[in-house]
Amino acid sequence: MQVDHYQFTDGDRSSTLAAGWALFDQLELHQPGEMVRVVEPHRVAAEAVLDAVLAGEVQESEALPLVWGEWRAAMAALRRAGAYGPSAIGTTVGLFTSDGGVPKHPRQAIEISYGGVIGDRQNDRGNHGRPWQAVCLWSREVIDRFAAEGHPLAPGLAGENITMAGIEWERIVPGVHLQAGDALLEISAYSVPCRKNAAWFTDGHFGLMHHRHGHVSRAYATVLEPGRVRLADPILLEPGP
C-alpha cells in the first residue's frame, strides 16, 4: 500500500505498526518534559489506533495511515515548538552501499529515492528497509571514539549509508531535518544493532552502539525530498522550512 510518497509491503505495514510504540518512545527519548507534552496528544491518538489493531477492531490497512500521520504530526509539532535548535553545517565524509549485509562499500556518490538508496539492498527485510529506514547515517566522531577505545571499527563497516562529520551527534534525534547534498532527510529512529556488527567490537560487544548508552547509535531517516549526495557535500542540520 502507499502512504504519501511511501510504498509499504504487507510486511512493512505489519512491522511498522508493531514498532509504533517504540517510534514514539524514541521521539521522546532525549526531549525535556515540555517537549514530551507536545508529543503526547499525537502519541495518545496513535496508541488508541494501535490498541484497536491488537483488539481486532481496526484493520492494519486502515491503521497505518492514521499512525503514520500522528507520528509525522508529532515531529512537525516539535519543530514548531523549537525542539531541534539552530542550524549547523557538517560534511559528508563517507558514502556506502552493499548488495546486502555488512560491511557496506564506499561510493563517490549515491542517489536517494523515497524508497532508499538506489542500489543498496538489505538481507533482512523484516527489520530493515521500511520507508522510515530509507537511509542510515552515522557520525565519524562517534566511530573515531569507538576506534580510540580499541574497537576495530571504521566508516561503512556497521552498515551506514552516510557517514557525516562536523555536527554534534547529540543533535541527531528523531524529527530533526538534514539537507544532505540534494536530498532532504528527516531522522526517524535509532538503528538497533544486531550480532552482525559483533566483528567491529572488542569481544563482540556490539551492544555498546545501542541508543540506551547515549548518543552513539546510528540513525535512520525518512526521505522528504529525493536527490543525489556526493562525497564532501555539505550536510545542513535544520535547514528551515
Image (cartoon, rainbow, N blue to C red):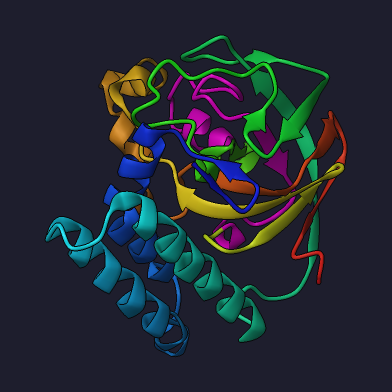
Q: Quadrant of residue 228?
A: top right
Q: Is residue 43 left or right of residue 146?
A: left
Residue visible at 33% across and 64% down in the picture:
25
Residue visible at 55% across and 34% down in the picture:
143
Residues rendered magenta in the picture: 143-172
Q: Quadrant of residue 233?
A: top right
Q: Quadrant of residue 105?
A: top right
Residue visible at 50% across and 74% down in the picture:
74
> Where is 124 relative to 236, above or below?
above
Foreground pick, 153 / 160: 160
Q: Position of residue 117 (x, y in %)?
A: 67, 28
Q: Position of residue 232 (x, y in %)?
A: 87, 34
Foreground pick, 153 / 172: 172
**Residue 219 visible to the viewer:** no
Foreground pick, 66 / 129: 66
Q: Is residue 92 left or right of residue 44?
A: right
Residue visible at 78% across and 41% down in the picture:
226
Q: Quadrant of the C terminus?
A: bottom right
